[in-house]
Image (spheres, rainbow, N blue to C red):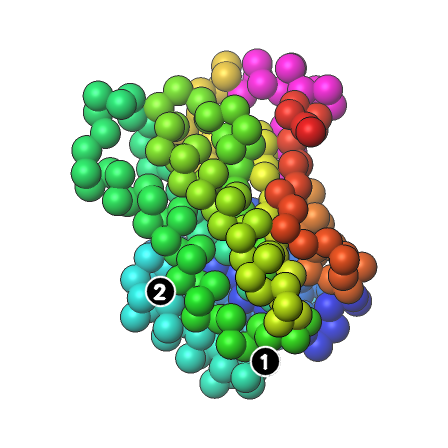
Amino acid sequence: MKLKGKIAVVTGGARDIGRAVSLKLAKEGAMIVVNYFNNYNDAIETAKMIKAIDGEVILVQGNATKLEDINNLAEKTVAAFGKKVDILVNVAGGLFARKSIEEIDNDFYNLLMNVNFKSCVFMTQAFKPYLVNSGVIVNFASQAVRDGGGPGASLYAASKAAVSTFTRAMAKELGPEGIRVNAVNPGMIATKFHDDFTKGEIREKVAAATPLKREGIASEVADLVAYLASDEASFITGNNIDINGGLAFS
């Protein structure tokens, strides 16, 4: 249990990859704070899964784009587990719709940039005081950072590119205070995200083009997050690590 006794906050931690991350970190011994927005039933189910493996978990509802909710999440975490937080995983994000440049309006722009990038910035700001000395931040970017995303995903790709660059900047800024910052760039992972926004024939085409000839699964992404959060990755910071079955790589 390489995270035994550590405190981990997972934004968007109630379902899909967020749930897999919450569960994996709990299996490795961490005490989990699951932040969720409107997926109450999913959050309850995630908490049950963690408790079923004798993990410790609290649920904190909140909008990851609202500063008052972000600060409340930090306050609830400290109240429950004390003033030392070891791991912050910024999973919260979304695509919401595929829109061409002609279809993008100001509200949609703000929605995408806020949920994918603003949330990451201000979660980092809120939790930074508690992460000093051996803290870890793992952000979620995307394969879209490399290839611009699929049709109608330009703002999603751009917002995730901002996360990618912000990760590098924070690694430099926070490293002297003992905080490591990395990002993961998932490719085609079998989740509700792609159930909602990617046509079946496109998923099949992408899987066929991937050297491993399949989609990834959420637990594989969670395994990578757990490694980055652990002392086994103690000299890794500022990286954006691809997990896409070989579809795109450096």
From the image, tell me which residue sits under label 1: 84
Q: Residues within 10 Å of mark 1 (few under 14, many from 20)?
A: some
Instruction: Name above or below for residue 184 compared with residue 62.
Output: above
Q: Is residue 190 visible?
A: no
Check disc 1 and give the amino acid type. Answer: Lys
User: Which quarter of the figure has residue 32?
Assistant: bottom right
Q: Position of residue 122 (x, y in %)?
A: 40, 62
* Disc 2, SS: loop
Estimate the spatial distance between the alpha carbons at disc 2 and disc 1, rounded to whole Å. Answer: 21 Å
Residue at horizontal 33%, vertical 42%? Answer: 112
Nearest the camera: 219 or 68? 68
* Horizontal arrangement in the rendering, residue 144 relative to residue 95 (left or right): right
Q: Which residues are magenta?
A: 203-219
Q: Quadrant of the C terminus?
A: top right
Residue at horizontal 64%, vertical 25%? Answer: 248
* Disc 1, SS: loop
User: Which quarter of the figure has residue 136?
Assistant: bottom right
From the image, tell me which residue sits under label 2: 62
Q: Position of residue 74 (x, y in %)?
A: 44, 74
Residue at horizontal 66%, vertical 41%? Answer: 241
N-term mark: 2 or 1: 2
Q: Is residue 112 visible?
A: yes
Give the label, 2 or 1, closer to the camera: 1
**Is residue 194 a member of the stretch shown in magenta?**
no
Which numbered marker is on residue 68? Answer: none
* Horizontal arrangement in the rendering, residue 165 relative to residue 155 (left or right): right
Check disc 2 and give the amino acid type. Answer: Gly
Q: Position of residue 63 (x, y in %)?
A: 33, 60
